[in-house]
Amino acid sequence: MIRRRALPALGASLLAAPAFAQAPWPARQIRLVVPYPPGGASDIAGRLQAQVLQEGLGVPVVVDNRAGAGGTIGTAHVAQSAPDGYTVMMASPSSHLGAPLLFKTPGYEGVDDFTAIATFATGTAMVCVTNSLPVRNIQELIAHARANPGKLNYGSAGAGGANHMLGVLFMQRTGVELTHVPYRGAAPALADLIAGNIQVVFDSFSGIIPTVRAGQVRALAVTNPTRWPLAPEFPTVQEQGVPDYDLPSFSAVMGPRGIPEPIVARMNSVINEGLKNPQLVERLTALGNAPYPTTPAEFGALMRAQRTTWQTLVRATGLQPE
């Protein structure tokens, strides 16, 4: 594991314009923290981000996996790092919007303690039902749920995660009552959906689309506000009569609060340019994702809006920080 080294002189110098001119950035290796273990989807996203930054900036960018406590260990480490552009992280709604609401002492505030640098990739989820459920679209699911209040169970990868919140948002927007069943991961929830032990899941596109295409479960919609380019045959929840149904899924690059604007602008430009690379687009597509370029201002506005949404959803569940 790469250990943090104190960077007092260089970190401080970058905060002043005259010193910035004397010490061009980047002058050495950059560290990109992934707050999850190696091998998962978040780790893959982080390694792609590191590759894009390394190629665009011309200095080594190393991935530092600092996993534990729902992503809060690595995320808190970045929040406490020097705002000099040499420590950044792979950020997601889970690390910055969900975890701060689910832990009593996460060690950071997910929006205000960070600099929004660039979004990188976006994904979507699918509303899927077990094959034995007699519904073929979202309106039929709503009607069935209203006729059987509380009798439809929906599974998630765990309380407080994105697929749990997608179910809460669905209930808020439609007025139906579903019973949440948390699992230890998405795989056992999907297995129970296939077996008919639960009736509904709101699962990531990349995780569930092979099962859908194999005919093992039935997909009713994608949760994206517009049709997903990797599977345009599936309508959205919104176009099936559920307004304002959207809980964005994305990976992004964030750093400690206070990174100088010229550094933020440079990193944002490098990432957005890298997202035009056909080979990178192909790799993202293979993962079920799509490029997601934004400006730092757009990214910051997204985070502030989503913080409010997540706060509302978590309050609705009654979940208490642990």
Image: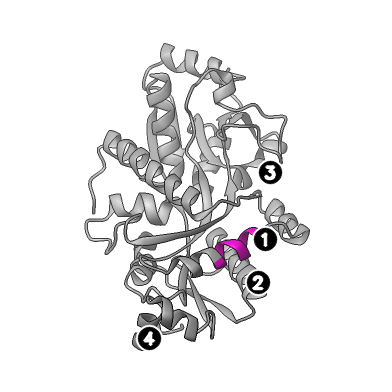
Tags 2 and 1 in contact by the CB under 8 Å rule?
yes
Write down the residue under mark 3: 210
- Which secondary structure lies at badge 4? loop
Q: What mark, if any, has residue 11 been given in the picture?
A: none
- In this rendering, the answer to whether 18 lies above or below 267 is below
Q: Amino acid at mark 1?
A: Glu
| Range covered by the magenta-colored residues | 266-273
Where does the image place residue 262, in percent across and percent down from the top left? 49, 68
Depth check: 204 or 256 in front?
Answer: 256
Marked residue nearer the N-terminal end (4 or 1): 4
Q: Amino acid at mark 3?
A: Pro
Identify the residue at horizontal 38%, vertical 81% (top origin). 11
Marked residue nearer the N-terminal end (2 or 1): 2
Q: Amino acid at mark 4?
A: Leu
Magenta highlight on residue 267: yes
Write down the residue under mark 1: 273
- In this rendering, the answer to whether 21 lies above or below 222 is below
